[in-house]
């Protein structure tokens, strides 16, 4: 029987197999940030354990940093707890000789934007980080997933992780999407189908012509959201697009090593006779722009639809959940979702803050400007690039000017309002069109109401002042 | 990690499905550099209103559930963020066991790093325990060695658990110490890696 892509990466990283089913798996790249590492470094210190491979570890400051005034440095961060956490990371990376892009460094940004952008994320690797959206790196054919802080400490000390093998699942995307539909819609449609627990215990490989057609940015968006379907990781086999993206990046192999690396990377594909524990197919030609209406990423609907009626849900638990979600979201069953007026727009996060995401949003802003339209009155719309380098690239293309002219705020990079650990937060009752990844109660600020959607959809909502069908703004 | 062998204590029902780690411990409590003291933020938005007053309706605020040690929860408990602050907060609050039909992977792993026992049971079994947790007598007994949960009325349910995880939790073993015993294996792997994939090291 053939092997899957996941099987092959797994097999290439087995250090030892323990009786009882645990495997000690080698980790090729460990990404760290300020929020989930202080206790791990403290644990190492207490046990007098060194960091085994500082050279395979890369640090950024992203979760709690403000998205303005970054050049003033950490000492100017107003939130004292956030400041202490940032200072703690700085001390820990210095003491352990770990490469670090501090706040304000042009290379700094959201950890899952920085890894690929630096060429550190490569096919066939195992990559971990104390952040659930580490699944993003699966877009490069790397086995990548989030871990807890105790596991961060374990990886720092041993460069390995104790793992049990997950199941293999494959989702094949076929068909050609209509304009206005892309990777975010694919991901939301899939989560809507399998539910937030649908991928639990599985690694999902995404395959098929609609995946091949996606850009690396689109693939990262899709793999990023694997965790919202409960999956351990998402994976896409590397191809020419992957190699082209990596080539020339600072961490990419150079010279003769490049050819050796590409040969090696090409070996990481699922065999034709590989058997998956579960297979699904999604026809993307049937999708229209998609968004969430409730407080779970599985609460998915098409933009031209009506808010669902809880009475129509299958079980008592689901009905209760839907009722609670409607109440929290301030929506009424049966209303067209485009009637929901918004107060905030957030374009950013590890899901959708890369250059292509910003281009798609800027295109909607530019078309609006051509028609004499801007961000609707009463709406505050923020654009937060994923890294300093994304910000620079966008500015070189003039995207910042389009956003600013259209009435969007152009911010400095970071996780920002995706999780609201920094000052960027929703106020109670505010409704937000957001390109992020979680619409949980209170996620973007207590009482805040989040609708997840693509960058183009969020930009269209900013112009309209309510949830809008991006197809009317193309 | 803290040892876990047997636990007898109050169980509280939280029937909502998909209780995510943002609900278990909201973002404002993640700015700590310590593992301790997070119990004050556990289920913060459920426990306190906008002014910081306790919400009397919430189960953990009710006098009958003060001192809770076990939570019987709806499906897919612990989904979302990887924050280990979630099990830290539960344990700091006094919770040592969560029973559900399913847990999200990262949360499940994090439990075993800390000595918080996640028990997976079938839907009808969780349903039965949920009903008893809502009742007047809600003292549950959990026995990891025997892999059983015993309800106040005497219903006994057997749960499955990975044997190596069970052993580590019973003994409170340090996973890093165990892995470091494999240092020669790691050295060998790294040597092979250096020979075959020189480009993958900075």
Image: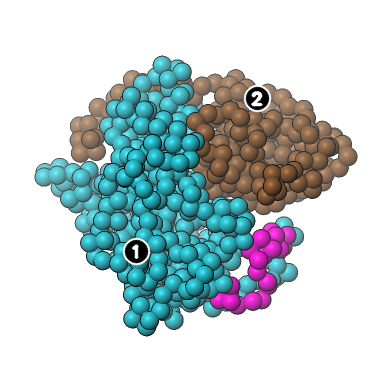
Residue position marked by numbered label 2 in the rendering: B4
Q: Look at the image and give the residue range highlighted in magenta.
A: A318-340
Q: In this view, does A20 lie above or below A68?
A: above
Q: Which residue is drawn at 46% across and 38% down?
A: A82
- The residue tagged with tag 2: helix, strand or loop? loop
Q: Residue at x 68, y 72 (%)?
A: A333
State yes or no: residue A135 in magenta.
Answer: no
Q: Is residue A309 above or below residue B200?
A: below
Q: Is residue A96 above or below residue A145?
A: above
Mark 1 belongs to which subunit?
Answer: A
Closer to the eye: label 1 or 2: 1
Assess disc 1: are there few (<14), some (14-19) or many (≥20) residues with their C-alpha within 10 Å of its C-alpha: many
User: Which chain comes out brown in the rendered image?
Assistant: B
- The residue tagged with tag 1: helix, strand or loop? helix
In front of the other: A202 or A57? A57
Residue A82 left/right relative to B189: right
Q: Residue at x 21, y 56 (%)?
A: A244
User: Which chain comes out cyan in the rendered image?
Assistant: A
Residue B164 position, x and y percent, is 55, 28
Mark 2 belongs to which subunit?
Answer: B
Q: Residue A358 carries which label?
A: 1
């Amino acid at each position: 029987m053939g092997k899957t892509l996941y099987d092959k990466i797994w097999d290439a990283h087995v250090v030892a197999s323990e009786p009882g089913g645990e495997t000690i798996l080698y980790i090729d790249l460990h990404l760290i940030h300020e929020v989930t590492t202080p206790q791990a470094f403290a644990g190492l210190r207490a046990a007098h354990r060194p960091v085994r491979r500082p050279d395979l570890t890369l640090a950024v400051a992203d979760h709690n940093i403000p998205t303005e005034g970054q050049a003033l440095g950490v000492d100017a961060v107003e939130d004292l707890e956030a400041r202490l956490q940032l200072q703690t990371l700085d001390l820990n990376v210095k003491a352990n000789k770990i490469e670090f892009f501090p706040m304000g460094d042009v290379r700094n940004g959201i950890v899952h934007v920085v890894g690929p952008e630096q060429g550190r994320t490569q096919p066939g690797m195992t990559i971990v980080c104390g952040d659930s959206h580490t699944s993003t790196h699966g877009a490069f054919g790397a086995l990548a997933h989030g871990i807890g802080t105790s596991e961060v400490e374990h990886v720092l000390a041993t460069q390995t992780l104790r793992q049990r093998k997950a199941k293999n699942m494959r989702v094949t995307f076929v068909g050609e999407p209509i304009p206005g539909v892309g990777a975010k819609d694919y991901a939301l449609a899939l989560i809507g189908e399998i539910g937030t627990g649908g991928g639990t215990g599985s690694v999902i490989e995404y395959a098929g012509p609609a995946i091949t057609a996606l850009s690396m940015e689109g693939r990262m968006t899709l793999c990023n959201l694997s965790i919202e379907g409960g999956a351990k990781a998402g994976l896409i086999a590397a191809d020419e697009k992957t190699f082209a993206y990596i080539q020339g990046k600072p961490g990419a192999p150079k010279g003769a090593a490049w050819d050796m690396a590409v040969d090696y990377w090409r070996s990481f594909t699922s065999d034709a006779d590989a058997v998956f524990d579960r297979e699904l197919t999604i026809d993307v030609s049937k999708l229209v722009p998609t968004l969430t209406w409730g407080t779970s990423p599985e609460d998915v609907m098409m933009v031209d639809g009506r808010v669902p009626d809880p009475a129509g849900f299958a079980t008592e638990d689901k009905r209760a959940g839907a009722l609670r979600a409607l109440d929290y979201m301030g929506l009424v069953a049966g209303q067209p979702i485009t009637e929901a007026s918004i107060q905030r727009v957030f374009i950013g996060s590890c899901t959708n803050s890369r250059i292509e995401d910003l281009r798609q949003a800027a295109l909607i802003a530019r078309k609006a400007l051509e028609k004499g339209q801007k961000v609707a009155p009463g709406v505050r719309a923020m654009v937060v690039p994923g890294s300093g380098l994304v910000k620079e690239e966008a500015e070189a293309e003039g995207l910042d000017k389009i956003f600013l002219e259209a009435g969007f705020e152009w911010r400095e990079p970071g996780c920002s309002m995706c999780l609201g650990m920094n000052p960027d937060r929703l106020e109670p009752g505010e409704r937000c069109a957001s390109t992020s990844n979680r619409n949980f109660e209170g996620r973007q600020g207590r009482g805040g109401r989040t609708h997840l959607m693509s960058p183009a959809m969020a930009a269209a909502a900013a112009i309209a002042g309510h949830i809008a069908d991006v197809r009317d703004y193309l | 990690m803290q040892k876990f062998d047997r636990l007898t204590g109050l169980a509280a029902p939280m029937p909502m499905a998909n209780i995510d780690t943002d609900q278990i411990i909201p973002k404002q409590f993640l700015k700590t550099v310590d593992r301790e003291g997070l119990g004050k933020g556990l289920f913060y938005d459920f426990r306190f209103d906008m002014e910081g007053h306790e919400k009397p309706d919430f189960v953990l605020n009710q006098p009958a559930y003060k001192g809770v040690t076990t939570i019987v929860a709806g499906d897919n408990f612990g989904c979302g963020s990887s924050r280990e602050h979630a099990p830290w907060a539960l344990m700091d609050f006094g919770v040592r066991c969560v029973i559900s039909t399913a847990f999200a992977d990262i949360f499940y792993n994090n439990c075993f790093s800390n000595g918080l026992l996640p028990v997976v049971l079938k839907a009808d079994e969780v349903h039965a325990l949920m009903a008893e947790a809502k009742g007047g007598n809600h003292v549950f007994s959990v026995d990891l060695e025997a892999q059983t949960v015993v309800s106040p009325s005497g219903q006994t349910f057997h749960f499955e658990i990975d044997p190596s995880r069970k052993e580590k939790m019973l003994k409170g073993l340090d996973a890093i110490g165990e892995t470091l015993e494999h240092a020669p294996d790691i050295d060998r792997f790294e040597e092979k890696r250096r020979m075959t994939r020189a480009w993958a090291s900075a």
